[in-house]
Image (cartoon, grey):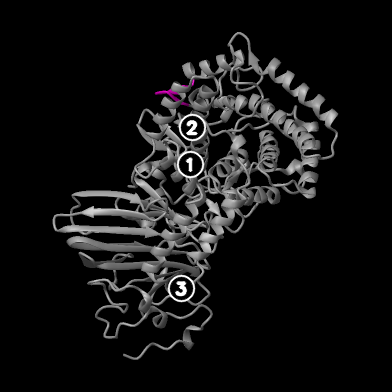
Amino acid sequence: MSLAIEDYGIIGDTHTAALVGTDGSIDWLCLPRFDSPSCFAKLLGDESNGFWRIAPAGEVRRRSRHYHGDSLVLETEFETSTGAVRLVDCMPLREDLPHVVRMVEGIGGEVAMRMDLAMRPGYGRVIPWVRRTGSLLLAAAGPDGLALWTPVRTRGEGMTTVAEFTVSAGQHTPFVLTWFPSHESPPRPVDARYAVADTRMWWQEWSSVNDFNGPWRGAVMRSLVTLKALTYRPTGGIVAAATTSLPETVGGVRNWDYRYCWLRDATLTLTALMRGGFHEEAMSWRDWLLRAVAGDPAELQIMYGPAGERRLDEWEVDWLAGYEGSKPVRVGNAASGQFQLDVYGEVMSALYQACVVGDPVSAPAWDLQRVLMDFVSGHWQDPDDGIWEVRGPRRNFTHSKVMAWVAVDRAIRMAEEFQQQGPVEDWKKLRGRIHAEVLEKGYDEKRGAFTQYYGSDALDASLLMIPIVDFLPATDPRMISTVEAIQRELTEDGFVLRYRAADAHDVDGLEGHEGAFLACSFWMADNLAMMGRSEEAVELFERLLGLRNDLGLLAEEYDARLGRQVGNFPQAFSHVSLVNSAYSLAGRSTDEMKRPGAIGLLRRARSWQSGLHPTGGSARPLAHRSSRQAPASPGAEPAGVPGDGRAAVPESRTAGRRGERRGDRKEPTP
């Protein structure tokens, strides 16, 4: 059985990410991209579906873990009756191929260790062909090749690769797993110790840009690092989560694939990045957005693949049992074909926000916005599927109409503030019409609250966005009464639900309960602060911080009944909302966001001085650093395979370069 969701940490290389448990096991990893088939899928099944565990062979008396500073290098310490070890896990920033580097460091005494590696490409279904070539253990299945390098002797045991070894104080024992196209020669392994050092340095340099010194700096920085970890660096797209099908209800059917990029998150994500000082990442996200939405505005999707892919066909992985029996496991997302009116407002708002912080609007970008406005003008009264991607009938969702108003409002602001041409007077009339209709049909006088859709008396937490997007001030009596109604009727243990899922089968087409949606709870804190109820806002915010796991990570939801996190993990929208709430509660308004020219130059200068490319790679390819360059470590294993009768030689000689034919390589002479 998999661990609790909060027992996992994340490592990644800004192309994909792995989930590492407190037991030293990597139970989820998709290669080479976030949305590729997984090679480890124990998270959604069992050990037969793939995992990679390195841990003490005997009983563990105590374990703890943390990230190294503001980095994505995870350190887990195990204490046994005979000694203590540290397991260091990371994925170096990718230059060509993805590597997972795991280093076992002896802290004190002597500890017997065991490694178990079950490589299962194809979402845990395929058992690869495994063979040894020199110091590399190679596995191939279809398009996927995996190469394991370690100085420790390995053996096969029940379709799993295992190793048993002992680590003493001061000793370092490395393991490196690399994915490569199976039709190519295996890559030369990276030097593990340099890889760990370079990865630490890169993340420390990257995170040094942030200047937030408020009371929640650690939470803010960890959220920003997590957001960067969920970024697909080649395009700037940001996936919603690293996982698929972690359930919103344990044992239920609300299991979705979140390894894609949602337009819903656009404005809040851009704002969080800009507030954090990460202008380059914010503009990369903006540029991804422009490329993804290009085309017929009638075909605008609510989500796209990491590179902007449109076809995200949904299918069920019937051989996976699901997280704690939560079936089905889904790949792809059928909601990508839904019509959601709110995304037009999200796109227009994000592009406007980019201009506000100093990035000039281009003629093609404005042409696109004009086309989007033409569509909104003709379709704002159409019913849609709503922000929550419900799989019931289309309705006139109040939040969707508010976001249609946002689209028109931001177009007017763009034209007036940045001297863009457009039918501004017509837009102003349209903005007034939408505003009046929402107040008339979206607000229930008897209920004293804005409602989920026209004619309904149900509440919906998306309505907390009304003051956040400037539709009404938070101090408007209608907004105050809406917030109070949500507090009374749409919370569990003080945390906000999206809507009453158990009572909304006719709306979302699904059965069952779901947990509190964490982003909505942060929006509640924002509303309370804007109303002047600062103490309540801070109290709720700090309660939300208390839901994070020991590494500072959040899933999509929190189930107050079970007292645990649920939903896909880690969730970008939760961390984006945390960042924005922290800045707001600390008195850092969006007006303070600016284009950080000086900071950006300093960041580049620091990066080059440290031998790192500012775009994310190392100035010196890791694969070209042989073990002869590595610092000596007492008691370390030699680079060769122990007991194989050959001399220890640098890995640069025991593994072929990419592009060499296997028959052309010669083994070194002892």
- CA gap between label 3 and label 1 equals 36 Å
What kind of residue is marked 1?
Phe
**Residue at image coords 76%, 47%:** 365
* Left/right of residue 330 with respect to residue 479 in the rendered view: left
What kind of residue is marked 3?
Ala
Q: Which residue is mark 3?
A: 623
Q: Which residue is mark 2?
A: 586
Nearest the eye: 333 or 301: 301
Nearest the eye: 404 or 268: 268
- Which stretch did the figure color magenta? 490-496
Describe the element under mark 1 as helix, strand or loop. Answer: loop
Q: Which residue is mark 1?
A: 212
**Residue at image coords 23%, 71%:** 634
* Left/right of residue 654 with respect to residue 313 in the rendered view: left
Please report contact status of discs 3 and 2: CB closer than 8 Å, yes or no.
no
Is residue 12 at all visible to an observer of this figure? no
